[in-house]
Amino acid sequence: MELIDVFKALSNETRLNILKWLKEPEKHFPKQGAHLPKGVSIKGGVCVGDIQEKANVSQSTVSHYLNMMQNAGLLESVRYGQWTYYRRNEETLSRLAEYFKTEI
């Protein structure tokens, strides 16, 4: 976890909102998994298109944001067919919380 990359990723309101929304994907993205065939589950994952729709930004912007957040370790992705699903990386978020508790 590169702290500077994490802080840069969180320094934008939309990116911060995405992280908050992905904390409770069922609440914020009720139609998640709509593109998946029956029997396939991407637990906690939300399709890029659903995130883009909720964030009300262009596809290229949301893709850039998600890539930045993934590179910082805040998100992880799973690709299924033509669809990419993102979810929070809870391990990184736990380490970040611990850093704040012990170092700052």
Image: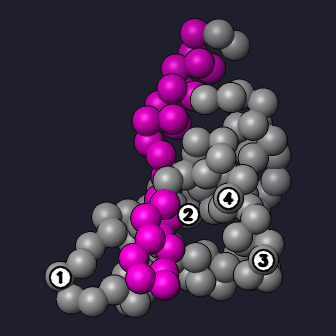
Residue 48 visible within the image: yes
Cα separation, mark 2 vs mark 1, equals 24 Å
User: In the rendering, at what x and y percent does residue 67 appear?
Assistant: 68, 59
| Residue found farthest to the front | 81
Quick one: label 3, few (<14), some, or many (20+) residues within 10 Å? few
Identify the residue at horizontal 81%, vertical 41% (top origin). 8
Q: Which residue has dot 3 on it?
A: 60
**Nearer the N terminus, badge 2 or badge 1?**
2
Q: Amino acid at mark 3?
A: Ser
**Nearer the N terminus, badge 4 or badge 1?**
1
Q: Which residue has dot 4 on it?
A: 67
Identify the residue at horizontal 72%, vertical 53% (top origin). 68
Q: Amino acid at mark 2?
A: Trp
Cα separation, mark 2 vs mark 4, equals 16 Å
Cα separation, mark 1 vs mark 3, equals 30 Å
**Nearer the N terminus, badge 3 or badge 4?**
3
Cα separation, mark 3 vs mark 4, equals 10 Å
User: In the rendering, at what x and y percent does residue 58 appear?
Assistant: 79, 82
- 97 within the magenta span: yes
Q: Which residue has dot 1 on it?
A: 39
User: In the rendering, at what x and y percent does residue 95 appear?
Assistant: 51, 26
- Numbered circles on residues, count: 4
Q: Which residue has dot 2 on it?
A: 21
SS for tag 2? helix
Cα separation, mark 4 vs mark 1, equals 27 Å
Identify the residue at horizontal 69%, vertical 13% (top origin). 104
Q: Dots 1 and 3: beta carbons under 8 Å?
A: no
Identify the residue at horizontal 79%, vertical 57% (top origin). 13
